[in-house]
Image: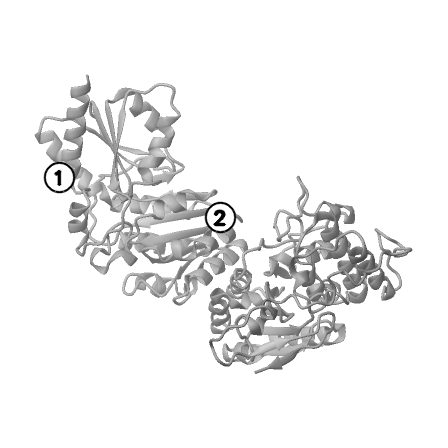
Amino acid sequence: MKKTSEQLAWLIRRHGIEMTHLSGGSHIGAIMSVADVVAVLYADVMKYRPEEPKWQDRDRFILSKGHAGASIYAALAEEGFFPVEELKTHYQNGSRLSGHVSHHLPGVDFSTGSLGHGLSAAVGMAYAAKKDKNENHKVYVVLGDGECNEGSVWEAALFANHFRLNNLVAIVDHNHMQSLDFNENTLEIEDFGAKWKAFGWNVVEINGNDHNELKAAFRYADENSKIAEHKPTVIIANTIKGYGISFMQNDILWHYRFPHDGWEYDTAVNELHKVKPDGIIDPYTPNGIENPVMPTEDDDIGNDHTFSSTWNTTYPEIMRRVEAKSGSGEREHKL
Amino acid sequence: MRDTFVKTLVQLAKEDKNIELVTGDLGFGVLKPFWEQCPDQFTNAGIAEQNMTSVAAGMALEGKNVFTYSIGNFPTLRCLEQIRNDCAYHNANVKVVCIGGGFVYGSLGMSHQATEDLAILRALPNVVVMAPADLVEAEECTKALANYNGTAYLRLGRGGEKRIHDRIDNFQIGKAIKVHDGEKIAIFSTGAIFEEVTAAYDELRDKGYNPAVYTFPTVKPIDKETIEKISMEYDLLVTVEEHNIVAGFGSAVAEVMAEMNDKKAKLLRIGLNDEYSIRVGNQKYLRQQYGMDSTSIVNKIQDAMQELQNNQ
């Protein structure tokens, strides 16, 4: 039976924890933030055929933020492109599942990993379809917000508007954090939506961890694709990095750190089990973890690991800052 | 050469609607025949080479046969990673075309001189690298690449090149072209520097030498067979390229020779001696300044022959 987006999102998160745990792989924070976007796309939005990955009328999909590859691998496996069992090979010798997305895997249209390429490639696909008057499919691309530091993203944004690519939908996983710190403490990007709008795009800004809002946004994008205005649509999906695991939320530590044996893994798994939707099975720990290891006072939890917590310039005199309490979903903008 | 390329591509594009030409906002006057005759197969991507190259990859993956076009280092080094990750790694049917290989844009300065492109593109797996010597080769390369399904680099001169070959029979990617038979000395060249080699050949004949001459329109895959054969038969093998001496055409020849069990020929590589051109002048002047004009080629060959005789 077809999974609901909520079921698929939960499975992506559970696989993400397991895959990074087993492999010592990075980017669990990004996998968690984008899980809902990916789940809604695969469960409710895109058309595809697992048994025929190159089906001509499939919607094209590019995960431009290739470091969150585990989220796509999990979705593809759960939707039947390859066995779920293979997910455990992530990062391993001889595996097909490289940390960053590879097209040497059924269901993947484009390899990524270097930021700032995916939107351009998606633009090329959408442009070719427009030229051929092929209206049977759309092109979806998911970007990171940190990725939008790359100039090539804005080159592509100009091109997509100029050539009226109404068959293109970009989703920015706006988790507000990048490698070392919050976006706003790295290179200010707000007012982010206004920037895209100024580049000529239809812009919709939503809570990207909320499935109802995501579904409504994709309906809006679909409607836009039909009207004569002919513009691409960007969904700015405001998400929380590490969403779904309390101690990972808004903590930059979990950009690179993987859930280690002990309290990190046990707590993460059990937190997920508290919100597990009915009708799906956790293939690794079907009932959660009995007698989990709990964090102690000596463990590094709830601390601010952002670059800005230790680094303060004297120039410029006024720099916008974002602060957040680790583990929360709240962010505070300060001047 | 660029006009020959455009003329040839227009003919091909009229027959094959999948051929697309995408420019990075360059080609004023030059590309006009294309956009006039094949408007729906033409795109100006603006001054944005990174995006142009990945867009081309995306289009190619949807079935298009895409030529990207710009000058000097802009379609190559500026967007090298896009060529590597998005075109070559995906075996995307993208042909990267550069106008102005070597010192073509001499007086414009170092930024516009493409003198490391062959080396860098040659180092990318899945990329065919071609540099035609004259207008005849330019036409043949364009046709061959239009029929080739994969990623390739086409390095062209600008204008004013001559037809040197009368005609080329059985042109193939990866095959050198014999221009003259000879003895003792064999000269290999790639790209438009062939005109200097042609002049050098005449001078050498006047001086009593009888060099063989081959052009290599394809730098990758290199014509191993010809290199091995000549290395066994001749005393001196000379490579000439309007490009850095490091890792380019001469180095590709050296790689083949270095792996031979036995060979007769000594190798002499002529090119830009691992430096940037800091002098100002036209192509002809810069070739002279950096030792790859016909006179320099003749002198270097004579010196090398003298040295070989002294060592005997």
Q: Is B184 on the left or on the right of A44, as rendered?
A: left
Give amino acid for label 2: Ala
Give amino acid for label 1: Thr
- Callout 1: residue from which chain? B
Q: Residues within 10 Å of mark 2 (few under 14, many from 20)?
A: many
Which one is nearer the viewer's eye here, A175 or A96? A175
Specify which label sits upstream in the sequence, 1 or 2.
Answer: 2
Residue bearing mark 1 = B295
Q: Position of residue B42 (x, y in %)?
A: 40, 63
Q: Position of residue A13 (x, y in %)?
A: 76, 60
Asked if the residue at tag 2 contacts the one at tag 1, i.e. Cβ–Cβ closer than 8 Å, the answer is no
The residue at the far bottom in this view is A335
| Label 2 secondary element | helix
Looking at the picture, the colour scheme in use is one colour
Residue B99, quarter of the rendered image: bottom left
- Callout 2: residue from which chain? B
Q: Is B309 on the left or on the right of B220, as rendered?
A: left
Tally the numbered discs. 2
Residue bearing mark 2 = B88
Q: Is B105 on the left or on the right of A46, as rendered?
A: left
The residue at the far left in this view is B206
Q: Position of residue B155 (x, y in %)?
A: 33, 49
Q: Is A199 on the left or on the right of B209, as rendered?
A: right
Quadrant location of the C terminus of chain A in the rendered image: bottom right
Classify A136 as above or below A265: below
Residue A326, quarter of the rendered image: bottom right
Task: Confirm whether residue B76 shows in the render.
Answer: no
Classify A151 as above or below B192: below
Q: CA distance from mark 1 to mark 2?
A: 39 Å
Which residue corresponds to the image point at 14% horizontal and 30% vertical from the top-left? B302
